Image (cartoon, grey):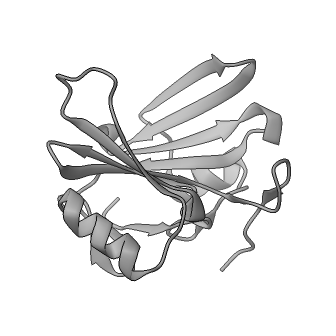
C-alpha cells in the first residue's frame, strides 16, 4: 500500500474504526501475518501488513471490529503532511498549535531505552519515538463516555 492517511478517531484511509474484519480484508487485502492475543481477559486479533509497517487490531469485546491502527511507514500522513521521521519537538509544536489537551509524555521504564511516547487523550493516539525521532503512530476510536465507543460514520 502506498498511502497511509492517519485520521485520528476515524480510521485509516477510507476504512473507519468499527469496520468488520471482512471490510478490512476487502480494502487492504489478506494480511501477511495474524496474531491472536489475550490481554487482561480481552481477546484481540492483530493483522500485520507491508512487512510490519501497518497493523490493524480487532477487539473481541467489540465483536472483532477494527479498534486500533498502528503505522510506521515513512509515507504516513497526518493533516496532509508526512509525519514519520519528524522530531519530538516538531510533534510537540504540532500538538500545541492544534490545542490538543491531555498530552502526556512517557519514557520507557528502562533508562537505557531510547524509546519515548507522547499520548494524546484528545486523539486517542500515541506518537512513538526512538532517539527523539517519530517512528510509529498508534490510534483508536474516540469515546462518548468511559464505557461507550464513539464509532465514526463513513466519511
x and y percent of residue 134 in the render?
Answer: 24, 53
Q: Which of 102 and 130 is in front in this view?
A: 102
The residue at the point 71 percent across, 24 percent down is 43
Q: As displayed, is residue 100 above or below residue 147?
A: below
Q: As displayed, is residue 119 above or below residue 35?
A: below
x and y percent of residue 132 in the render?
Answer: 17, 49
The residue at the point 81 percent across, 62 percent down is 144
Q: As displayed, is residue 44 above or below residue 66?
A: above
Q: Which of 152 and 92 is in front in this view?
A: 92
Horizontal arrangement in the rendering, residue 36 relative to residue 91 (left or right): right
Q: Can residue 78 be seen in this view?
A: no
x and y percent of residue 59 in the render?
Answer: 71, 37
Q: Which image quarter holds the N terminus?
A: bottom left
x and y percent of residue 136 in the render?
Answer: 32, 49
Q: Is residue 122 visible?
A: yes
Q: Indicate the quadrant where residue 102 lies.
A: bottom right
Number of marks in the rendered image: 0
Q: As displayed, is residue 134 above or below residue 58?
A: below
The residue at the point 44 percent across, 80 percent down is 98
Q: Which of 119 and 16 is in front in this view?
A: 119
Q: Which image quarter holds the C terminus?
A: bottom right
Horizontal arrangement in the rendering, residue 67 relative to residue 42 (left or right): left
Q: Nearer the viewer, residue 62 or 34?
A: 62
The residue at the point 29 percent across, 41 percent down is 116
Horizontal arrangement in the rendering, residue 86 relative to residue 91 (left or right): left
Amino acid at each position: 500500500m502506498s498511502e497511509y492517511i492517519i485520521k485520528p478517531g476515524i480510521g485509516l484511509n477510507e476504512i473507519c474504526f468499527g469496520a468488520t474484519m471482512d471490510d478490512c480484508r476487502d480494502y487492504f487485502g489478506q494480511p501477511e501475518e495474524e496474531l491472536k492475543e489475550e490481554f487482561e481477559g480481552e481477546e484481540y486479533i492483530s493483522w500485520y501488513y507491508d512487512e510490519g509497517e501497518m497493523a490493524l487490531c480487532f477487539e473481541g469485546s467489540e465483536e472483532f471490529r477494527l479498534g486500533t491502527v498502528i503505522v510506521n511507514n515513512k509515507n504516513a500522513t497526518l493533516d496532509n503532511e508526512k509525519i514519520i521521521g519528524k522530531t519530538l519537538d516538531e510533534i510537540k509544536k504540532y500538538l500545541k498549535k492544534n490545542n490538543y489537551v491531555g498530552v502526556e509524555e512517557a519514557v520507557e521504564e528502562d533508562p537505557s531505552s531510547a524509546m519515548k511516547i507522547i499520548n494524546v487523550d484528545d486523539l486517542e493516539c500515541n506518537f512513538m519515538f526512538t532517539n527523539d525521532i517519530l517512528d510509529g503512530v498508534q490510534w483508536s476510536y474516540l469515546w462518548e463516555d468511559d464505557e461507550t465507543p464513539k464509532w465514526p460514520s463513513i466519511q
